[in-house]
Each structure stands twice: as C-alpha cells, then as structure tokens.
Image (tube, helix red, strand yellow):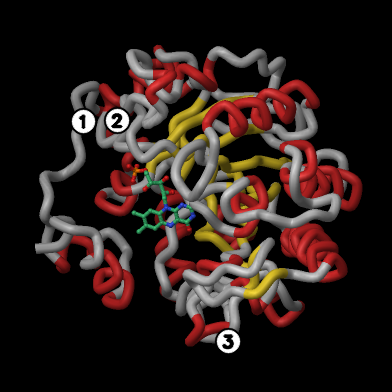
Amino acid sequence: MDRLFEPMTLLRGPAWKNRFMLAPLTNQQSHPDGRLSDAEYRWLTMRATGGFGLVMTAASHVQAAGQGFPGQIGCFGDEHLEGLTRLAAGIRAGGAVSSVQLHHAGNRAPKELVGTPVCPSDDAETGARALTLAEVEAVRDDFIAAAKRAEKAGFDGVEVHGAHGYILAQFLSPEVNRRDDRYGGSLENRARLILEVLAGIRAACRPDFQLGLRLSPERFGLVLPEIREVAAEILRAGQIDYLDMSLWDIGKEPMDDAFKGRTLMSLFTELPRGDVRLGAAGKVMGAESAKSLLDAGCDFVVVGRGAILRHDFPERVRHDNAYNSPTLPVTARHLMDEGLSSGFVDYMKNWKGFVA
Ligand SMILES: Cc1cc2nc3c(=O)[nH]c(=O)nc-3n(C[C@H](O)[C@H](O)[C@H](O)COP(=O)(O)O)c2cc1C
C-alpha cells in the first residue's frame, strides 16, 4: 500500500504527492455560459483537500460548438479566466496538482446546445456535418488556445480528452472519419489532429506545463491495434507527461477476439514508455483495487465513482488498508455531504443503481 503514497515525478511540471488522480467527472454544475459556479468550486476543492495528488476538472469544451453537456465548465473564452483562476488557486491551496481536461464533443454535442453538431465527416445518425479543412485547423488551434488559457489561469497542466468517442476519437475512427484530406484515410492521417494538438500545446505553453492525454481503446468505431499503435508512438515521442487510459474496468478483457485471454490494460502497460507515466481508470473502488493497478504495471490510479462517493478516498486508503467505497446505492443526503450539489446528484441518477 505504501507505493500508492510515494510521490511521483513526471517528465515536466510538479511531482504529484501520491499516485491518486481524480478522474475527469462531468458534473453539470457550471453556469450555462461555461463560467465556474461555487458548487463546482466546492466539489473540486474538496477533492484536493481529500488527498488526491492530481485534481482533474470535468471535460471542459474548447469551442462553444464542442459543448457536450448542459452546465459544462468552459475553457473557450476569456470570460472563463476568472473562474478558472479561482479554481486553480483553490486546488493548489488544497495541496493538489491541477489540470483542466480539454474537450470537444464533435458529433456527440446535443443539438439543443450547439445547433448542428460537427464531425470529421457527415454523419447521418447524429445529423452532424463534416468540418471543412479550415475548421479542422480551427479545432486544433482552439485546443491549443484553451491550454494557454488554463496556463494563464494558473493550472499546472491540461489533459487532452482523446477518449469516449468525442471529436479526437472521431478523427481516429475509420468508421466515423471518411475524409480524404490530410486528416483522413491512413492511420497516420487520422492521428494527425491529436498529434498536432499535443505538439501545439507543447510549443505554446511554458516548458514545465504538464501535459496528459486520455485515450479509450474500444467502441465508437475504434480499432484496438490502431489505438495501441498511436499510444506506442506518443509514448515513444515523450511529448506528453502522462497517459490516462479510460478502460471502465481495469480487469476487463479486450472486446477484440484476437486479444482474448489477457487484460485490455496489459496491452498498454507492456508498451515501452520511458519516463512517461501511465495510469488507468475503471472500477477502482477501494484500497485493494488501487494497489492491484500498480501491481499490474501502472504508475498511478485514476478514481472516478469512488471519489464521488468519498471526497477523501486517498486519505481513507491511507488510514485503512482494507478501505472499500460505500455500498451502492447511496442516499442523496450522503452525496450532498460529500460536496455534490442537488443538480449533480440528479445527474448521478442517470447511473443505474448509484443513488437510492
Ligand atoms: C458522472 C461521471 C462523469 C464523467 N465525466 C467524464 C468526463 O468529463 N471526462 C472523461 O474523460 N471521463 C468522464 N467520466 C469517466 C470517468 O472519468 C472514469 O473514467 C470512469 O467513471 C471509470 O472510473 P470509475 O470506475 O472509477 O468511475 C465520467 C464518469 C462518470 C461516472
């Protein structure tokens, strides 16, 4: 268990005091225009004082057209700077390293929020329209501008959201991305946007600005060996400081029959990564599963629902080798005591069996 509480140095930026990262968790608590609310400030700063080494914000859209959820925290305009600055300071005061998760929902943006959503290619299912080449470049530049804004606000870094079928994953998918320009076709072309975003942030922000990437390797038309190849290339290049794999279950087997009989995670822990750090998310609900993730070859542990249930998940693990999250469902009162607003509690009712 002690290893979970060893500090972790990274290639760039501040060391984390332990191996616990708060997962990016959409909570719909910000104002309709994307400015930070007091409720969102409270929710996140409580996780900083609860002992997380790194506190990640919820997915934060880099363009108004990329909004994926009502009440999403924005990073696309200078009107967001004041709230982001307050948040960065609050997380630091709580003792954690801070990061904004940069996001664009692409074809998953609800029509009620953005009008016609955009996508690498026209998409009949969602009614999304293909981005022009100039618009693809604008998406890239807006990811970079949002990172600059997070830097200006005082965040220690950003994580680029390349997971869960949002726009960067849409570009990676041969099913969704049918472009015939330099952003479509070969894997090299489909990975170009994500690589340009990472390189652009690295070039635009200060040298010790900590840069992470989140990937998920399955569903949404992704091809597992391709995502592994992209991850391998990014780890080899050493431009990012950490890779955060969103697996939804750290013990699961790959869906792809060719890889059955081993864990999905092992496909990534076995990649050479130099000093780039690797973490994963998916059902870490207590001390034992957190430890098992390090035993399986990860450097850090990403905690989502366990951190909703207890703001001080890391502290509880530190005091109790056998700590387990409260049994589900929990009451709304319990969640409010753990720093969720009533709106966030309502959102959690979408997760079957979570709220009584
Ligand atoms: C309420 C909720 C909101 C989430 N929001 C985001 C998000 O904004 N960005 C993201 O990359 N993942 C998001 N996720 C996924 C989590 O970051 C995490 O990967 C997932 O919940 C699995 O970890 P867990 O089993 O510890 O919850 C969300 C998950 C939940 C339950």
Q: Secondary structure at mark 3?
A: loop
State the CA–CA distance, disc 2 to disc 1: 5 Å
Circles 2, 3 touching at the beta carbon (< 8 Å): no
State the CA–CA distance, disc 1 to disc 3: 46 Å
Total marks in image = 3
Q: Nearer the viewer, residue 111 or 22?
A: 111
Whether label 3 lies within 8 Å of ligand 1 gets the answer no
Closest to the camera, between mark 1 and mark 3, is: 3
Look at label 1 and name its amino acid: Tyr
Residue 96: x %, y % from top left: 55, 44
- For image coordinates 70% across by 48% down, the residue present is 157
Q: Nearer the viewer, residue 105 or 128?
A: 128
- For image coordinates 56% across by 24% down, the residue present is 7
Q: Label 3, on which residue? A: 115
- For image coordinates 57% across by 50% down, the residue present is 175
Asked if residue 209 shows in the view, the reply is no
In the figure, 282 relative to 173: above or below? above
Q: Left or right? Give the position of 49 relative to 8.
A: left
Circles 2, 1 touching at the beta carbon (< 8 Å): yes
- The earlier-in-sequence mark between 2 and 1 is 2
Q: Secondary structure at mark 1?
A: loop
Q: Which quadrant would residue 114 be assigned to in this image?
A: bottom right
- The earlier-in-sequence mark between 2 and 3 is 3
Whether label 2 lies within 8 Å of ligand 1 gets the answer no
Q: If the image is split into quadrants, where does the N terminus sit?
A: top left
Q: Label 1, on which residue? A: 323
Q: If the image is split into quadrants, where does the C terminus sit?
A: bottom left
Residue 120: x %, y % from top left: 68, 61
Q: Label 2, on which residue? A: 317
Local crowd at mark 3 within 10 Å, few (<14), some, or many (≥20)?
few
Look at label 3 and name its amino acid: Gly
